[in-house]
Image (spheres, grey):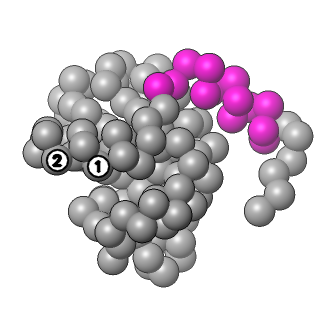
Amino acid sequence: MEHSAGFLKLAEDAKSRVREVTVEQTRERLKTNPEARLIDVREDHEWQAAHATGAEHMSRGIIERDIEREVPDKEAELILYCGGGYRSALAADNLQKMGYRNVHSLAGGWTAWQEANAPTE
């Protein structure tokens, strides 16, 4: 998908404040920390088509609304992903502004996950 210049500028600004992790780092974090949560922030139709094994779904449109109810622990390790790493960076930036201190964005998102042949459902 081709992104607009304004969207890319906004996402790159968010990325300057967000920690990104690779697919390999994500899989290792999930393995070593059973409390870590992998959250897919893509749209409903993207999630329904396929998603990372073990992920939970809170789309970009609702994550800020629902996160405090779903994950009240502000120290919880959260790894967010979207299609290419832009929407997840925006969401991670917002969660950090909400007080979450251990939030990451998956670099390359769903595309990177598939390219790494990581498990999917």
Residue 107 coordinates in the image, percent (x, y) = 53, 42
Where residue 31 is drawn, which disc sits there?
Answer: 2
Q: Residue furthest right?
A: 5
Q: Which amino acid does label 1 sit on?
A: Arg
Query: Does 38 sit left or right of 80 as displayed?
Result: left
Q: Where is residue 9 in the image (x, y as percent from the top left)?
A: 79, 31
Q: Residues within 10 Å of mark 2 (few under 14, many from 20)?
A: few
Residue 15, compared with residue 35, is above or below; it is above
Name the amino acid type tagged 2: Lys
Callout 1 touching callout 2 (CB < 8 Å):
yes
Q: Is residue 88 visible?
A: yes
Residue that appears at 33% across and 77% down:
121
What segment is highlighted magenta in the picture?
7-19
Instruction: Please tell me whether residue 19 is drawn above or below residue 39 in the rendered image.
Output: above
8 vs 71, left or right, is: right
Q: Could you tell me which residue is drawn at 70 percent across and 29 percent down?
A: 12
Q: Which of 10 and 116 is in front in this view?
A: 116
* 41 or 104, nearer to the observer: 104
Q: Which residue is drawn at 44% across and 41% down?
A: 22
Neighbourhood count class around disc 1 (C-alpha, 10 Å): few under 14, some 14–19, many 20 upward: some
Residue 65 circle label: none
Q: Which mark is residue 27?
A: 1
Q: Is residue 61 visible?
A: no
Under tag 2, what secondary structure?
helix
Compute the Cα span from label 1 to label 2: 6 Å
Residue 17 in the magenta stretch? The answer is yes
